[in-house]
Each structure stands twice: as structure tokens, then as C-alpha cells.
Amino acid sequence: MALAGTHVVFIDDGGVLSDNDRRAPQWRRLVGEYFAPRLGGAPEAWARANVGAFERSWARYLAYLEDVGARGGVDRWIRDDRGRWLVDMCEQVGVTPPSEPGAEAVAAGAWISERVHAEIPGAGDAVRGLARRGLVLHTASGGLSWELEPYLRGMGVREHFDRLYGPDLVDTHKNGPHYYAAILAHAAVDPSAAVVVDDGESPRAWAAAAGLRTYASLAELLAAID
């Protein structure tokens, strides 16, 4: 193996494992399939409502990051905001929100994510190939562990990953080198023994600042290994 001393690979989801452009329209359709029979309204209305509700949720998250920086409370905030996302859609569709919107939104997300098929071509085979080489695989995503799990199950690669690192497991946002320092500490991994695969320039720069070697794609990593 060309990358001598490497034992661990941290892999981002969107842009590395999954194609976000293909994922978004599937999500809109599946939102309608999930909520229409449970809460009422037409599936198409739910799909339309999700567009604006998602944009407002993302804007809240960016404002939240600016306010709190790297501080904790990640999991609770995300679960609460998923509830706000659902209530927003209910208001647009014209149906009564459930009594526990946060819990219902999380359940919906798991159901939907496992049914999304947006794998980047070759990503699943690359993951299986890395696992066959004896490398320990973790995620290193901005998505939370309980959001990543159903995507990986849907891809058929969940069993090849150890820890699903998102901000919740280390209670640290993925917005600077502190995120990679936190997952390295949690996994008890020396940065010299690990690499990060992320399509984003900023995350790769943060990972490099934490002492990790970085690659923009799984294909690039496999080429370096071979």
C-alpha cells in the first residue's frame, strides 16, 4: 500500500458518497409519499412546501452557526429545527402538525433517506474495496450520525463503517479545524495514521490544519493507494 502507515479513512457523505443534486428531488417526492397518508394533503403539495421549508431551515442553521461558533448543543438544536421544518410545511399544506413534530420529522427523515438512491457512481464499490484492505472507515460529515445511518443502509455499505461522525457525536460543528481535532480525539487516532476524503476545499483545508492528509474523491484516494 502506497500510503504507508495509514489505518483510518474519514469519508464525507455529500459530494463523496452521495450526489446532492440527485438527492434533493428524490427527497421532495418522498416527503410527499411519507406525510400525505399520515397527515393529509396532496403529495405534490408536500413536495412544493419542502422547497421553501428547507431553504428557511438552512438559513436558520447558518445563522445559528454564526451565533454559536463551534459550541455544543448540536443534536438538540437539529432535532428541534427538524420540528420547525415540519410545522412550516404543515402550515403551507394546510394540515394540523403532529403533537411531537420533532420526533415525527426525525422518523420521516430515516424513512426517506433509506429510500433515496443518489450514490455517486463507484462509491459503494470503493468503500467495499477500502474495507477489504483492512482500513477502518468512519464518516466525517456535516450530517448527524442518525441522518447518515439510513443513507448508508440504502447504499448497502453501512456494515463497512465503524463510527458515523457528524457534529452530534463530538458535539462540534463541521466549520473549522476543531471538528477534525474532535473526531480524531474521539476515535483515538493519530492524524499521521489517517486520511480524509472530502470534495470541499474548505473542509480539506481544515483537515490539513489538523494534520490529516486529504483527498477530493474516493477515486483519488484509491489511485494513491494503488
Image (tube, rainbow, N blue to C red):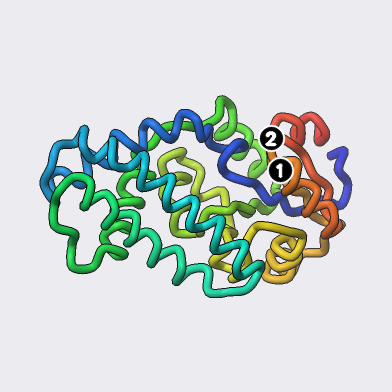
Q: Quadrant of residue 225?
A: top right
Earlier in the chain: of badge 2 and badge 1, it is: 1
The correct choice, above or below, for 67 with respect to 225 in the image is below
Q: Mark 1 points at which residue?
A: 197
Q: Mark 2 points at which residue?
A: 218
Q: In which quarter of the image is the N terminus?
A: top right
From the top left corner, tell me how far across and down residue 156 is, in percent: 46, 40
Q: Is residue 31 left or right of residue 56?
A: left
Residue located at (73% from left, 70% from top): 185
Closer to us: 163 or 175: 175
Q: Is residue 114 left or right of residue 40?
A: right
Secondary structure beneath label 1: strand
Secondary structure beneath label 2: helix
Residue located at (43% from left, 45% from top): 55
Name the residue type under label 2: Leu
From the top left corner, tell me how far across and down residue 67 is, in percent: 60, 67
Q: Is residue 60 left or right of residue 190?
A: left
Q: In which quarter of the image is the C terminus?
A: top right
Q: How far apart are marks 2 and 1 (CA)?
A: 7 Å
Name the residue type under label 1: Val
Q: Quadrant of residue 210?
A: bottom right
From the top left corner, tell me how far across and down residue 197 is, in percent: 71, 43
Closer to us: 113 or 32: 32
Residue located at (56% from left, 55% from top): 62
Report the label total: 2
